[in-house]
């Protein structure tokens, strides 16, 4: 479903819009108190502080997927994150649990880069070229339909926390991997595992062909041509600039950044790894961080004995993550109170079954 379909559905009532921030916060607290354990609110690290302050669990994609799978008590899961995360929560939760996304416009440009029809077409072509030698893996940052595709073909989901473990798992089963939809996470992970660049090829779904033709026989990892519009903004020039201006700073980046940025950085890892590495570093350490701005600012505010700043000073936050704000959160909670839950995320049973296979293949293996 295209998130633009929902634009007209998203008009916050005037009564909410005119409330002060303090009144909104008090009302959220009040509703949380009334609903108690009937309500569960996971919040991704990239969410705004005005939202994350109310989250019952905060974490990266893998942690939140595990939390959603664990919570069997809540009637309502209000997901403070983006659309594919709420879908994942719906797939992993019980039938009697309702998942809400406070603003349906909170999509993900990377997830939108792999459309199921494009993937089906590519798969047919790749089967012709390589026969039955490919296992599909998808970053959780993808639609439920893509996860279902992977489940149907014995593949799995992966997150940035477990990508290496999942690639190892996949290579035990098949000779080749189709990695969707983030070429960078796929390339960075495979490269770290010793797969050579000439053993990777980028599939361009728009032109329906490999980006470079050559000896495709040796290809072991087929990278879908998708990327994160936030993390692609960190460049090798940013790294050079920091090395010049602040040579005592260590550089840590997310593996959604390009290979050249990841290779030039001192460390790379999922948002959880970034948070923990900085938290556990010595007082006085200096960090230039290549990930989403809300998180970088939060770490900087929390780790007062360290200097933490963005690797790219002109960075914007993830605009779709930012769609979830206090008014939308409150609006969502009020809809539960009125017993008319709105912006419910519900994956159809057929898709859910196969997507669950892909997610379980990850949750049972990935660490
Ligand atoms: P992780 O939470 O897996 O680090 O992914 C980052 C991200 O871009 C989420 O949208
Ligand atoms: Fe999608 Fe990138 Fe935003 Fe994550 S940070 S939700 S991958 S656009």
Image: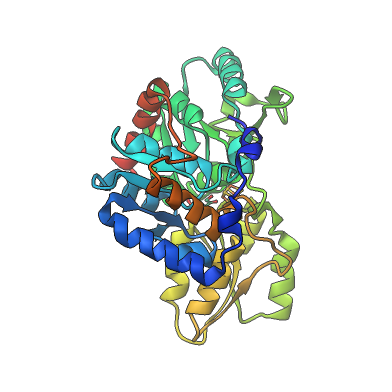
Q: Is residue 121 visible?
A: yes
Q: Which quarter of the rendered picture does the N terminus lie within? A: top right
Q: Residue 123 appears in which quarter of the rendering?
A: top right
Q: Is residue 293 left or right of residue 329?
A: right
| Outermost residue to the left | 73
Q: Closest to the observer: 96 or 315?
A: 96
Residue 142 coordinates in the image, percent (x, y): 52, 37
Q: Is residue 87 left or right of residue 123?
A: left
Q: Is residue 54 visible?
A: no
Q: What residue sits 56% from the left and 48% below the top?
A: 188
318 in relation to 148, above or below: below
Q: What residue sits 61% from the left and 36% below the top?
A: 6
Q: Closest to the observer: 203 or 100?
A: 100
Q: What residue sits 31% from the left and 62% below the top?
A: 33
| Outermost residue to the top | 128
Residue 155 coordinates in the image, percent (x, y): 41, 29
Q: Closest to the observer: 125 or 26?
A: 26
Q: What residue sits 38% from the left and 54% below the top?
A: 41
């Amino acid at each position: 479903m295209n998130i633009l379909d929902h634009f007209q559905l998203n008009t916050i009532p005037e009564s909410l819009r005119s409330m002060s921030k303090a009144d909104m916060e008090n009302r959220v607290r009040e509703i949380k108190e009334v609903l108690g354990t009937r309500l569960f609110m996971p919040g991704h690290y990239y969410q705004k502080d005005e939202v994350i302050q109310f989250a019952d669990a905060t974490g990266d994609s893998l942690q939140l997927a595990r939390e959603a799978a664990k919570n069997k008590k809540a009637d309502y899961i209000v997901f403070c994150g983006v659309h594919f995360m709420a879908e994942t929560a719906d797939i992993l939760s019980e039938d009697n649990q309702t998942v809400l996304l406070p603003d349906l416009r909170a999509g993900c440009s990377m997830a939108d880069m792999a459309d199921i029809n494009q993937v089906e077409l590519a798969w047919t072509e790749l089967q012709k070229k390589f026969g039955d030698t490919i296992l599909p893996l998808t970053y959780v940052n993808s639609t439920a339909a893509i996860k279902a595709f992977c489940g149907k073909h014995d593949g799995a989901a992966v997150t940035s926390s477990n990508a290496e473990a999942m690639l190892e798992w996949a290579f035990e089963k098949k000779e080749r991997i189709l990695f969707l939809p983030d070429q960078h996470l796929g390339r960075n992970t495979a490269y770290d595992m010793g797969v050579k660049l000439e053993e990777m090829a980028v599939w361009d779904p728009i032109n329906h062909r490999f980006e470079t033709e050559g000896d495709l026989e040796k290809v072991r990892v087929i990278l879908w041509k998708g990327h994160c519009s936030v993390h692609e903004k960190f460049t090798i020039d940013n790294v050079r600039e920091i090395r010049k201006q602040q040579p005592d700073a260590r550089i840590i980046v997310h593996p959604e950044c390009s290979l050249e940025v990841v290779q030039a950085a001192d460390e790379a890892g999922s948002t959880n790894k970034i948070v923990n590495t900085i938290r556990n570093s010595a007082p006085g350490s200096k960090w230039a961080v290549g990930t989403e701005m809300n998180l970088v600012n939060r770490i900087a505010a929390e780790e007062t004995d360290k200097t933490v700043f963005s690797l790219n000073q002109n960075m914007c936050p993830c605009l779709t993550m930012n769609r979830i704000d206090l008014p939308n959160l409150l609006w969502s909670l009020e809809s539960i109170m009125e017993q008319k839950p709105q912006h419910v995320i519900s994956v159809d049973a057929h898709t859910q079954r196969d997507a669950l296979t892909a997610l379980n293949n990850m949750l049972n293996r990935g660490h």
